[in-house]
Amino acid sequence: VQLVESGGGLVQPGRSLRLSCTASGSLFSGYAMSWYRQAPGKQREFVAVVTSRGSTGFSAVYADSVKGRFTASGDNAKKTVYLQMNNLKPDDTAVYYCAARLSGCSGGPISYPYWGQGTQVTVSS
């Protein structure tokens, strides 16, 4: 079981990036997939959680700090979730992680048994 993120990089403020997280093995169906981020010297912070609703698509919930700028989505066939990040700000600079847990579970980062390796996002002029 593996989660692999990609898509990070260095961008100027106001620009966009799209992160991807692809799951392997039996992971994906029946799981909630979340995005977290961690900036240097700070705790890991929730960004968004996306849950498959089967044929009707995906639903997402966002942290207030990214609401209106970030959009989380998924592709069941590719076992991939995405995080489209628009109007990026220097405060968005962090390592972004994808995490998975069974749908219906609750709690913070400790409730997620599966994590990706992280991808660096740096927003700077």
Image (tube, rainbow, N blue to C red):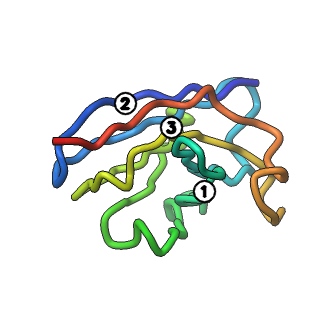
Image quadrant containing the C terminus: top left
Name the residue at the front extreme. Answer: 41
Label 3 environment density (alpha carbons within 10 Å; few <14, some 14–19, many ≥20): some
On residue 95, the disc is 3
Mark nearer the N terminus (3 vs 2): 2
Residue 45 lies left or right of residue 9; in this view the side is right
Residue 105: image x %, image y %?
Answer: 83, 62
Q: Please identify the quarter of the rendering in which residue 17 is found.
A: top left
C-alpha span from label 3 to label 1: 10 Å
* Residue pointed to by mark 2: 7
Image quadrant containing the N terminus: top right
Q: Dots 2 and 1: beta carbons under 8 Å? A: no
Mark nearer the N terminus (2 vs 1): 2
Dot 3 lies on which element?
A: strand
> Of the residues shown, which amino acid type is indicated by label 1?
Glu
Q: Nearer the viewer, mark 3 or mark 2?
A: 3
Residue at 45% in and 53% down: 73
Q: Nearer the viewer, residue 67 or 71?
A: 67
Dot 2 lies on which element?
A: loop
The relative height of residue 95 versus residue 15 in the rendered view (above or below) is above
Residue 82: image x %, image y %?
Answer: 44, 45
Mark nearer the N terminus (3 vs 1): 1
Residue 80 lies left or right of residue 106; in this view the side is left
Q: Please identify the quarter of the rendering in which residue 11 is found.
A: top left
Residue at 40% in and 38% down: 19
C-alpha span from label 3 to label 2: 11 Å
Residue 42: image x %, image y %?
Answer: 60, 50
